[in-house]
Image (cartoon, rainbow, N blue to C red):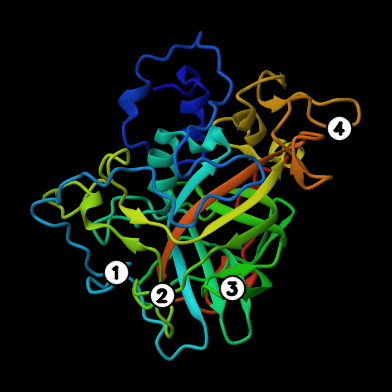
């Protein structure tokens, strides 16, 4: 299928470089299709307006799906762990985790069901292991230091040995951007949940099809993590934090002969139950500098639905002062919805499980010795 035949929704999926779960969905599109404006976010517990955060444990499903028979095999993940932990934080000075679910609730252009399932989930899901049949190309790490009240977060390159040596934080220049982990303070509320201070700038790398030399970097501004419940394998108690949220064994289809299980219909049952939320914004100017090489268009074009483009539709049109002509739903100068409308608000709920995070000394993308690493979408 040629890229030119996709509507903006199909284009978004290709742009992030992940394999779509159901390519046939786009068979009816034609080159004459006019890209529609992003859909308005729907209702439900996870609906998120600009500037708001979804409930940490938001769930728009009715949990009616039956258990697969036989059950989905989850080795080498820890089957006795409520969140299928990939490691154990017992005895460690920090709780190290990898996101296993990122349920995007805003902006609407990225919160559409098929993009969530076929793009985001496909990248976060592990590469044909633990019953998951994703690419593992989108690894977001979080290190919770509950002794010193610090949170360190950032992306990771594809891991050769996720269960042995584990993951490392990306620390390299990509397209002129320093993509590196960020550490901020955090506080614990009376209910035991954790919230971070504002993260001024966080560059989140997504490795296209797992290629360490083909990277798209999402530029998040003033991001915050909140409502996070760290638990010992899903039990809400003190001690070792191996889980944020939990795995739902009924949220998958019966395993294939290869032992892999597709996500069940998310309208009835989710594979993961979240227990943390995050929010921040992406300026349209920065999004216009994120050139999604696979598609040949900027992230700004995808977010705005192709409204007011330039350079043959590859870029958002700009005003004489360099600002983007199209409007978002958030203002960076006032850090609030509406207003100057120069940004889009990004919000999501998430689940995570314990994972090994190493110092990255032997990985070029993590020790600062890797040259190139893609253009980060920067022109």
The vertical placement of 325 against 261, above or below, is: above
- Spatial CA span between label 3 and label 2: 15 Å
Q: Earlier in the sequence, mark 3 or mark 2?
A: 3
User: Mark 2 — residue?
Assistant: 231
Q: Dot 2: within a 10 Å radius of its alpha carbon, few (fewer than 14), some, or many (20 or more) residues?
A: many
Q: Secondary structure at mark 4?
A: loop
Q: Earlier in the sequence, mark 2 or mark 4?
A: 2
Q: Are marks 4 and 3 in contact (CB under 8 Å)?
A: no
The vertical placement of 100 against 161, above or below, is: above
Q: Horizontal and vertical percent for residue 23? A: 34, 29
Q: Are marks 3 and 1 in contact (CB under 8 Å)?
A: no
Picture residue at 53% right of the left edge, 71% below the top: 193
For residue 199, which quarter of the picture?
A: bottom right
Query: Is label 4 or label 1 in front?
Result: 1
User: Mark 1 — residue?
Assistant: 82
Q: Is residue 215 visible?
A: no
- Spatial CA span between label 2 and label 1: 10 Å
Q: Secondary structure at mark 2?
A: loop
Q: Dot 3: within a 10 Å radius of its alpha carbon, few (fewer than 14), some, or many (20 or more) residues?
A: few
């Amino acid at each position: 299928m040629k890229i030119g035949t996709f509507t903006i929704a199909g284009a978004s999926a290709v742009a992030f470089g992940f394999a779509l779960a159901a390519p046939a969905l786009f068979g009816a599109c034609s080159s004459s299709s006019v890209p529609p404006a992003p859909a308005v976010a729907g209702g439900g517990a996870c609906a998120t307006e600009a500037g708001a955060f979804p409930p940490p444990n938001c769930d728009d499903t009715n949990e009616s799906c039956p258990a697969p028979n036989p059950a989905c095999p989850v080795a080498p993940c820890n089957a006795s762990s409520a969140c299928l932990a990939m490691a154990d934080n017992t005895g460690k000075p920090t709780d190290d985790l990898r996101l296993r679910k990122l349920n995007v609730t805003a902006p609407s252009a990225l919160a559409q069901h098929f993009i969530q399932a076929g793009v985001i989930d496909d990248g976060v899901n592990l590469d044909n292991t633990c019953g998951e049949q994703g690419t593992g190309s989108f690894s977001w790490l979080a290190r919770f230091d509950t002794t010193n009240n610090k949170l360190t977060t950032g992306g990771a390159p594809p891991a050769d040995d996720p269960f042995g040596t584990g993951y490392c934080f990306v620390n390299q220049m990509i397209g002129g951007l320093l993509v590196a982990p960020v550490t901020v303070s955090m506080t614990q509320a009376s209910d035991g949940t954790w919230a971070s201070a504002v993260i001024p700038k966080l560059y989140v790398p997504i490795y296209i099809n797992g290629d360490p030399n083909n990277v798209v970097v999402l530029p998040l501004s003033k991001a915050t993590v909140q409502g996070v419940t760290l638990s010992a394998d899903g039990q809400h108690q003190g001690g070792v934090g191996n889980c944020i949220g939990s795995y739902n064994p009924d949220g998958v289809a019966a395993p294939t002969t290869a032992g892999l299980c597709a996500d069940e219909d998310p309208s009835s049952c989710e594979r993961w139950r979240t227990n943390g939320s995050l929010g921040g914004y992406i300026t349209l100017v920065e999004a216009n500098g994120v050139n999604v090489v696979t598609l040949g268009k900027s992230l700004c074009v995808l977010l705005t639905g192709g409204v007011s483009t330039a350079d043959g539709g590859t870029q958002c049109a700009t005003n004489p002062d360099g600002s983007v002509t199209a409007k978002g739903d958030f203002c960076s100068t006032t850090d609030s919805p509406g207003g100057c409308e120069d940004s889009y608000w990004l919000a999501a709920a998430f689940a995570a499980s314990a994972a090994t995070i190493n110092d990255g000394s032997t990985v070029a993308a993590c020790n600062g010795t890797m040259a190139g690493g893609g253009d980060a979408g920067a022109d």
